[in-house]
Image: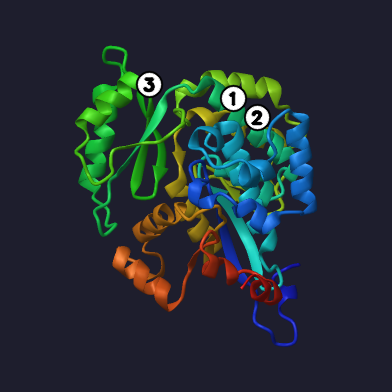
Amino acid sequence: MSRSDSMVNGASERERLLIVCPGRGTYNAAEWGTLNRLAGGSEWLTRFDAMRREADLPTLSELDGEIPFRQSLQGRGEHASPLIYACAWADLLSIDRERYDIVAVTGNSMGWYIALAAAGALGPDETLHLIGTMGWLMQESLAGGQVLYPWVDDAWRPDWALRKELLALIEQIHGIAGAELYLSIELGGMLVFGGNETGLSRLTERLPARERFPLRLHQHAAFHTPLQEGVKREARRRLGAGPFRAPEVPMIDGRGHIWTPWSTDPQALWDYTLGEQLVEPYDFTAAVKVGVREFAPDRIVIPGPGATLGGATAQALIQLGWQGWSDKAAFQSGQQQEPRLLCMGIAEQRDRLLPAQAASALG
């Protein structure tokens, strides 16, 4: 339905949503059970489970319900990634499309694969196959790792001098005595570094201790760095370009580039997804900023599971000055008055996006 079609009998126009899909690390013990609660018994989850069973893997329903949560199991790439996708897919399907218009889609890291499904560039089953394959390849190689460190202060105000110092550490450490260190993800007010064990060890020694940082990300390889060249080669061999198609709504990738329904070359989309996206830094911050500037959303929505991506997204929006937000306090005050950033992993925020009857039934 077009924007003009949404004006019926004087009713207000549908609100414009920018969808921001979550990446690895968002399904943890607290999220165990989410999928069955939201989608248990659904036709599509039954289909996903059948695909997993055919691949001789535990089903998503089993991992989310019958099998008690263990980080060593559910946190593995071939399980964690499909679980996150399925939870996000359940949330995306629940959005009331009579009241909300999805105008663009982006994601963080693995969230780019979810964005392909959300935008219609891949079918849901094809996306499960892609995500499951990539999760398995990453887990099997587990080349390097990732370390997370903030460059904003405690009030989420940018410290540009600190950012410059942190990026300089890459040049100071990389290439010295076997150390490999790269920028992996620009994540709002944080930097994610990727590297081999030597590089990450030396980085950790140089980073000032700050609350829980530097934080080593559990069971994460050095995503978006040259250490994934082997994964890239194998992924391109296994995953043909056939299922890719032009998206139905615009997508914003990890460079801030927009893939539109009217100009996307499916072969180029495949090439980016299984090429540059795997071995070059992923600029989540740029993707969010482009989404806000180019598509003027009324609200930004992060599907579940969990809500851990909310902070990084808010930090990116603070850098942009969106809604007049200048720091964490301004963001929190604005959210209390009228929430513009909605995390569907938070029940009351999710309910705002559901059809009225569905929200009342869940309540």
Between 340 and 48, the one lying in front of the other is 48
Q: 291 or 193: which is nearer to us?
A: 193
Which image quarter holds the N terminus? Answer: bottom right
Amino acid found under the numbered disc labelled 3 = Asn
Disc 3 and disc 1: Cα gap in Å?
17 Å
- Residue type highlighted by circle 2: Thr
Q: Which mark is residue 133?
A: 2
Image height check: is 15 above or below 164?
A: below
- Rendered residue at 36%/69% (across/down): 332
The C terminus: image quadrant: bottom right
- Residues 72 and 217: in front is 72
Q: Residue furthest bottom?
A: 10
Q: Which mark is residue 196?
A: 3
Q: Where in the figure is residue 191, as x and y percent of width and height?
A: 35, 41
Q: Secondary structure at mark 2?
A: helix
Instruction: State how far apart marks 2 and 1 are (Cα).
Output: 6 Å
Going by the numbered disc 1, the residue's amino acid type is Leu
Q: How many marks?
A: 3
Q: Which mark is residue 137?
A: 1
Label ID, residue 57: none
Q: How much space separates mark 2 and mark 3, taking CA atoms?
A: 23 Å
- Is any atom of residue 265 visible in this view? no
Question: CB under 8 Å between callouts 2 and 1?
Answer: yes
